[in-house]
C-alpha cells in the first residue's frame, strides 16, 4: 500500500510496532498530555493511503474481516460487516462515537486524551473505506479541546482528504447509543430512534451511516497499517486483539489499561495495583453488565467466552471491584435509580417500568416492605420493551444482583445488613432536578 | 389462504391507550403500566381483527407485518 503524500515538515518515519507488545493504542510510559501529530507519526508511521478505489476498499475490508476486530463500544459486533454494509450504499457518513455517557467508564476519554490522532486516523480511514466524505467525531466535553487542537494540527499538515467535524457528545447515559448519537448530532436530542430503519441504511441526514466506537476506530487504524495477523498476535483465537478496560472501585490505583483480550480478571485487577480490600463481588462490563462473585470471576479470562459461564461479558471493558464491607444491594439500587432517571422517557415500559423497578430495588435494599415477586414480574414486563436496550441492560444488572447478593436479600428482609462501609463505591452523578 | 402475521408495537409512538388490547384480548395484554404486550404470532383467524386494531390505534403505533 502506498503512503499518504509526504507531509511537509514531518519525518517520513514508519515505525514497526512489535505485535506482541502492549500498549498498542495508548502512549507507552507516563508522559502526560496527548501525543502530538509528529509523535503519533513517529510511532506508527503514516496511514496507508486508501485512494477510494473500490478494489482498495474491498481489500482493506477483507483485511479487517481477517483481523476479527469487533466493536469496542459494548456490543462486540464484527467491524468488517458494518463497514461492508455501509460501503455498499451511496453517499454514506461516518460517525466516531466517543460519547461515553457511562459515569463509571473512562476508557474512551483516556484514549481520546492520549491518542487523539489514532482515533482521527481511524475515523478518516473508515470514511475512506466506505466512500464517505465526512467523518463526524463525537467526543465527551472533557476532551473536546484536545480534539480541537488535534484536528487543527492535521489541517495545518494537510493530512486528510475527508472532512472531520467535531461534536461534543450529550452528557446522558443513553446519549451513547448509536441511534441516539445520530439523533443528537442532527437535532440535539440525545434519545434513541426506532429501528428499523437501520442506521446503515438511513441515519444522519437520511444517509447511510456507519457508527463506530472511537476505540474500534483506533484499532482499525492499526489493522490498516500492520495487518490482520499483527492484530491477532494478541488476544484469543476467537476474540483477537486488545481492549481498553476501566478498573475502579476497591483497587489501589483505579485506572484505564489496555489488555490482551482473555487476560484473567485477577491479572487485570493487579494492573490497577490489586484489590485495596477483601473483595466480595465484581461488576463486569458496565452498568448494563453483570455482578459476579469475586472468587468466581477472578480466575476467568476477561473475554466473551471466558465470562459466559457467569452470564457476564466484557461489555465496554469495565471492572468495578466491590469490597466485602459494602452492600451490593445498596450499590445496585443507586445505579438502578440513576439508570431509571436516565431513561430518554420515550417508551412507556422504560419510563414508568424502570421507575417502579428502581423504587422496588431501593425498598429491598432499605429493608422496607417490598415484594421480590412483584419486582420479578416487573423485570419480565420491562425486558425487551424499549426502542433501545436501555431497559434490557438495567434488567440484566438487577437480575444478576438478585442472584449474587441472594444472601444479602434474606438479611435485608429481616431488617439488617452486614455492610459497614459508608459512602458509595460505584460513581453516579447527582440527580438531575426535573 | 391467509399468511401468518406478526404485530409489532412502536414503543416510542405508543401511548398506552389500550384500544388494541380491547380488540385482541387474547393476543394483546397490557403490562402494569397499561402498555401492550404482544403474545406471539397472529393466528389466521385473528388477522382481520389485527388489521382493525392497527387502523384504530390513535398513535399509529401498531403495525402488522406479514411473514414471507
Image (cartoon, coloured by chain):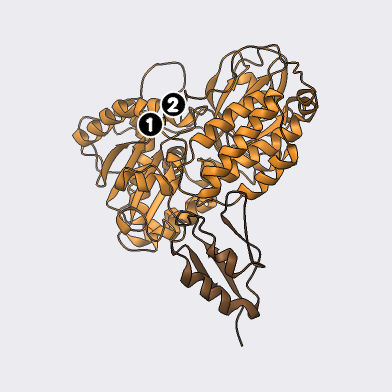
Chain colours: A orange, B brown
Q: On the rendered image, what quadrant is the C terminus of chain A found in?
A: top left
| Residue identified by numbered label 2 | A110
Task: Identify the residue shown where x is 36% and y is 31%.
Answer: A116
Looking at the image, residue A354 sits to the left or right of residue A144; the answer is right
Residue A193 shown left or right of residue A41 in the figure: right
Pinpoint residue A293: horizontal percent, then vertical percent.
74, 28
In the structure shown, which secondary structural element does the residue marked by tag 2 occupy?
helix
* Chain of residue at mark 2: A
Q: Give how far across and how far down residue A159 sits, in percent.
A: 25, 39
Q: Secondary structure at mark 1?
A: loop
- Residue plotted at (30% across, 55% down): A205
- Badge 1: residue crowd in 10 Å (few <14, some 14–19, many ≥20): some
Question: In which chain is the residue bearing label 1?
Answer: A
Q: Is the residue at mark 1 from the same chain as the one at mark 2?
A: yes
Q: Earlier in the sequence, mark 1 or mark 2?
A: 2
- Give the alpha-carbon distance from disc 1 to disc 2, as whole Å: 10 Å
Q: Are marks 1 and 2 in contact (CB under 8 Å)?
A: no
For residue A301, what is the image quadrant? top right
| Image location (x, y in percent) of residue A416 | 76, 18
Residue linked to disc 1: A140
Where residue A403 appears, as percent x and y from the top left, is 75, 35
Answer yes or no: is residue A84 visible: yes
Amino acid at each position: 500500500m502506498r503512503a499518504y503524500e509526504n507531509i511537509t515538515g514531518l519525518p517520513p518515519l514508519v515505525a514497526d510496532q512489535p505485535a506482541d507488545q502492549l500498549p498498542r493504542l495508548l502512549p507507552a510510559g507516563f508522559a502526560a498530555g496527548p501525543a502530538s501529530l509528529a509523535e503519533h507519526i513517529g510511532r506508527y508511521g503514516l496511514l496507508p493511503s486508501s485512494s477510494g478505489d473500490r478494489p482498495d476498499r474491498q481489500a482493506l475490508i477483507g483485511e479487517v474481516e481477517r483481523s476479527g476486530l469487533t466493536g469496542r463500544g459494548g456490543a462486540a459486533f464484527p467491524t468488517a460487516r458494518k463497514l461492508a454494509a455501509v460501503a455498499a450504499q451511496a453517499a454514506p457518513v461516518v460517525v466516531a462515537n466517543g460519547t461515553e455517557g457511562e459515569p463509571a467508564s473512562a476508557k474512551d476519554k483516556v484514549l481520546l486524551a492520549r491518542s487523539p490522532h489514532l482515533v482521527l486516523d481511524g475515523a478518516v480511514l473508515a470514511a475512506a473505506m466506505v466512500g464517505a466524505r465526512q467523518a463526524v467525531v463525537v467526543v465527551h466535553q472533557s476532551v473536546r479541546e484536545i480534539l480541537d487542537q488535534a484536528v487543527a494540527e492535521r489541517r495545518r499538515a494537510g493530512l486528510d482528504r475527508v472532512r472531520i467535524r467535531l461534536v461534543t457528545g450529550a452528557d446522558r447515559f443513553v446519549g451513547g447509543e448509536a441511534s441516539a448519537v445520530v439523533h443528537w448530532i442532527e437535532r440535539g436530542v440525545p434519545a434513541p430512534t426506532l429501528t428499523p430503519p437501520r442506521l446503515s441504511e438511513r441515519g444522519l441526514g437520511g444517509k447511510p451511516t456507519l457508527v463506530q466506537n472511537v476505540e474500534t476506530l483506533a484499532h482499525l487504524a492499526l489493522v490498516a497499517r500492520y495487518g490482520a495477523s499483527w492484530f491477532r498476535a494478541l488476544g484469543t483465537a476467537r476474540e483477537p486483539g486488545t481492549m481498553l478496560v476501566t478498573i475502579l472501585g476497591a483497587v489501589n490505583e483505579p485506572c484505564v489499561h489496555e489488555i490482551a483480550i482473555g487476560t484473567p480478571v485477577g491479572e487485570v485487577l493487579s494492573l490497577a495495583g490489586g484489590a485495596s480490600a477483601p473483595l466480595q463481588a465484581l461488576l463486569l462490563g458496565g452498568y448494563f453488565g453483570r455482578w459476579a462473585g469475586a472468587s468466581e470471576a477472578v480466575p476467568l479470562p476477561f473475554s466473551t467466552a471466558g465470562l459466559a459461564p457467569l452470564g457476564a461479558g466484557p461489555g465496554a471493558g469495565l471492572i468495578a471491584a466491590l469490597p466485602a464491607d459494602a452492600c451490593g444491594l445498596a450499590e445496585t439500587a443507586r445505579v438502578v435509580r440513576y439508570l431509571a432517571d436516565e431513561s430518554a422517557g420515550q417508551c412507556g415500559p422504560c419510563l414508568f417500568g424502570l421507575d417502579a423497578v428502581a423504587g422496588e430495588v431501593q425498598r429491598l435494599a432499605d429493608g422496607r416492605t417490598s415484594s421480590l415477586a412483584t419486582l420479578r414480574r416487573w423485570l419480565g414486563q420491562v425486558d425487551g420493551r424499549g426502542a433501545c436496550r436501555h431497559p434490557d441492560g438495567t434488567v440484566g444488572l438487577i437480575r444478576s444482583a438478585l442472584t449474587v447478593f441472594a444472601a444479602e436479600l434474606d438479611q435485608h428482609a429481616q431488617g439488617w445488613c452486614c455492610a459497614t462501609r459508608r459512602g458509595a463505591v460505584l460513581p453516579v452523578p447527582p440527580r438531575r432536578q426535573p | 389462504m391467509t399468511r401468518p402475521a406478526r404485530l409489532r408495537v412502536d414503543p416510542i409512538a405508543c401511548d398506552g391507550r389500550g384500544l388494541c388490547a380491547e380488540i385482541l384480548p387474547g393476543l394483546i395484554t397490557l403490562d402494569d403500566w397499561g402498555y401492550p404486550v404482544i403474545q406471539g404470532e397472529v393466528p389466521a383467524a385473528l388477522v382481520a381483527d389485527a388489521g382493525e386494531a392497527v387502523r384504530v390505534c390513535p398513535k399509529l403505533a401498531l403495525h402488522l407485518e406479514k411473514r414471507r
